[in-house]
Image: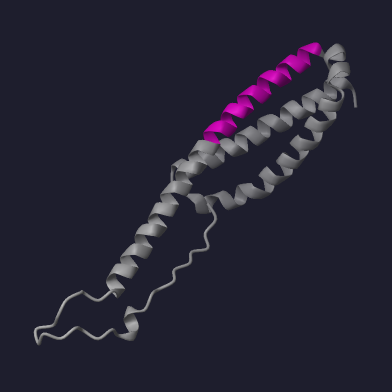
């Protein structure tokens, strides 16, 4: 593979990977994490190809810069745009994580509140007996965001 072809391949892979990540970002902003599933296989494949090509180009960067300087400059521009897309994606993921954690915490607090008996005495001046229903409740949610 020639220097220009190698760099062009990485540029194409980077653009495709950026497009997939932008689609994920849009879905996360629309609060549709379940729709991310179909994108995962392509993202994994493109991510592995990106890493492999980037490693090869990194090992030969001096040679490639001499052989294809125009393409190397274009690659740097594409990678710079890609990093900005990744930064935005990271911010959206962090926000989704915070929202999910708050939601789980609020649900578990509400379940615990409902299972706790009211403190105080009954109308007969007795403390209420604790029922089996007022035991602590464990809550587990297995959802990947």
Q: Residue at x 63, y 33 (%)?
A: 18
Across and down, in percent, residue 104 comes to 41, 59
Across and down, in percent, residue 65 comes to 83, 15
Colour treatment of the image: one colour
Q: Which one is in front, 119 or 26?
A: 119
Going by the image, does 100 lie left or right of 131? right
Q: Which stretch is magenta?
A: 69-89
Q: Residue at x 44, y 53 (%)?
A: 101
Across and down, in percent, residue 24 comes to 55, 42
Going by the image, does 95 lie left or right of 54? left
Q: Main secondary structure of the magenta part?
A: helix
Across and down, in percent, residue 52 comes to 80, 36
Residue 108 sits in which quadrant? bottom left
Q: Which one is in front, 53 or 129?
A: 129
Going by the image, does 137 lie left or right of 8? left
Going by the image, does 33 lie left or right of 122? right
Is 13 above or below relative to 128?
above
Q: Residue at x 90, y 27 (%)?
A: 1
Q: Is residue 28 magenta?
A: no
């Amino acid at each position: 593979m020639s220097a220009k072809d190698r760099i062009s391949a990485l540029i194409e892979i980077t653009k495709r990977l950026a497009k997939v990540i932008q689609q994920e970002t849009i879905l996360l902003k629309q609060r549709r994490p379940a729709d991310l599933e179909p994108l995962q296989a392509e993202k994994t494949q493109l991510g592995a190809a990106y890493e492999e090509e980037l490693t090869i180009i990194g090992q030969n960067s001096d040679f490639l810069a001499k052989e294809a300087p125009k393409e190397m400059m274009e690659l740097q521009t594409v990678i710079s745009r890609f990093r900005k897309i990744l930064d935005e994606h990271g911010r959206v993921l962090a926000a989704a994580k915070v929202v999910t954690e708050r939601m789980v915490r609020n649900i578990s607090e509400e379940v615990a509140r409902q299972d706790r008996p009211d403190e105080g005495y009954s109308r007969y001046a007795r403390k209420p007996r604790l029922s089996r229903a007022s035991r602590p409740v464990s809550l587990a949610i297995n959802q990947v965001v």
